[in-house]
Image (tube, rainbow, N blue to C red):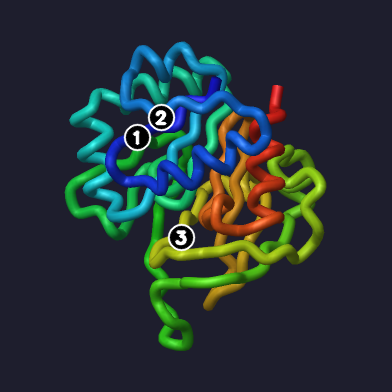
Amino acid sequence: MIALIDYGMGNIHSVKKALEIYGAKVIVTNSPKVIASSRKIVLPGVGAFDDAMRELIKRGLVYVIKQQIDKGKQFLGICLGMQLLFQTSEEAKNSKGLGILKGCVKRFTSKDIKVPHMGWNQIKFKKQNAGRKCKLLTGIPKNAFVYFCHSYYPAPKDKEVIAATCAYGLDFACVIAKGNTYGVQFHPEKSQEIGLKMLKNFVKLC
């Protein structure tokens, strides 16, 4: 069973539908008990970092998320859900992130690009880093296009966790992988065949 965390900030139904295509049993939940009993966890997210952390704290979900990741449970953060894995965000005035990964979430600042970054863009594998072993990217062709919608991007302190990047004003981390923890800055549920393949890979992870 995959626990799809509902904290009022995610594109829940599209993600659920996409995961179920590949036979996954998905339960939409904000229950720590249900999350703890699941085999895998997905944290989606659309909106502001501060608001998201406030909702996770209010629902008592921070501890169980950290606990289950520490136990080795497969975890996928999508868009804002990926950003929440980090320690801090330039968007957040009052909240710290989950701190699963070291680093900060930064805002695009180049005057040569439009913010938010919205639409289709290519991802490039980082073969020397986590990209060599990122099971989320199994069978994904080089320079594949995926769908983005964001104004902030993660900047990991440990560059080895970066599995793929995207060029938009700068090369930013758009796929991270560290052990059982994965994150994507784009929306796989909106990225047609490529995104669905990544979700299939997550469903099939042991």
Q: Position of residue 141 (x, y in %)?
A: 81, 58
Residue tagged by mark 3?
Answer: 153
Q: Quadrant of the N terminus?
A: top right
Please identify, in this view, whether the residue under mark 2 or under mark 3 is nearer the observer: 2
How packed mark 2 is, by other alpha carbons closer than 10 Å (few <14, some 14-19, many 20 or more), is: some
In the image, residue 78 sits, relative to residue 59, either above or below, namely: below
Q: Earlier in the sequence, mark 1 or mark 3?
A: 1
Identity, as a three-letter code, of the amino acid under mark 3: Tyr
Q: Mark 1 to mark 2: distance in Å?
A: 6 Å
Residue tagged by mark 1?
Answer: 6
User: Looking at the image, which residue is at 50% across and 20% down?
Assistant: 70
Q: Is residue 69 left or right of residue 109?
A: right
Answer with the quarter of the image where residue 143 lies: bottom right
Q: Position of residue 67 (x, y in %)?
A: 42, 18
Mark 1 and 2 residues: CB-CB less than 8 Å, in contact?
Answer: yes
Identity, as a three-letter code, of the amino acid under mark 1: Asp
Q: Secondary structure at mark 1?
A: loop
Q: Is residue 113 visible?
A: yes
Identity, as a three-letter code, of the amino acid under mark 2: Val
User: Looking at the image, which residue is at 60% across and 51% down?
Assistant: 175
Residue tagged by mark 2?
Answer: 28
How packed mark 3 is, by other alpha carbons closer than 10 Å (few <14, some 14-19, many 20 or more), is: many
Answer with the quarter of the image where residue 165 lies: bottom right
Q: Position of residue 80 (x, y in %)?
A: 40, 50
Mark 1 and 3 residues: CB-CB less than 8 Å, in contact?
Answer: no
In the image, residue 167 sits, relative to residue 34, either above or below, namely: below
Q: Mark 2 to mark 3: distance in Å?
A: 26 Å
Q: Is residue 107 left or right of residue 206?
A: left
Q: Nearer the viewer, residue 62 or 28?
A: 28
User: Looking at the image, which residue is at 48% across and 39% down?
Assistant: 101
Q: Is residue 193 left or right of residue 67?
A: right
Q: Is residue 86 visible?
A: no
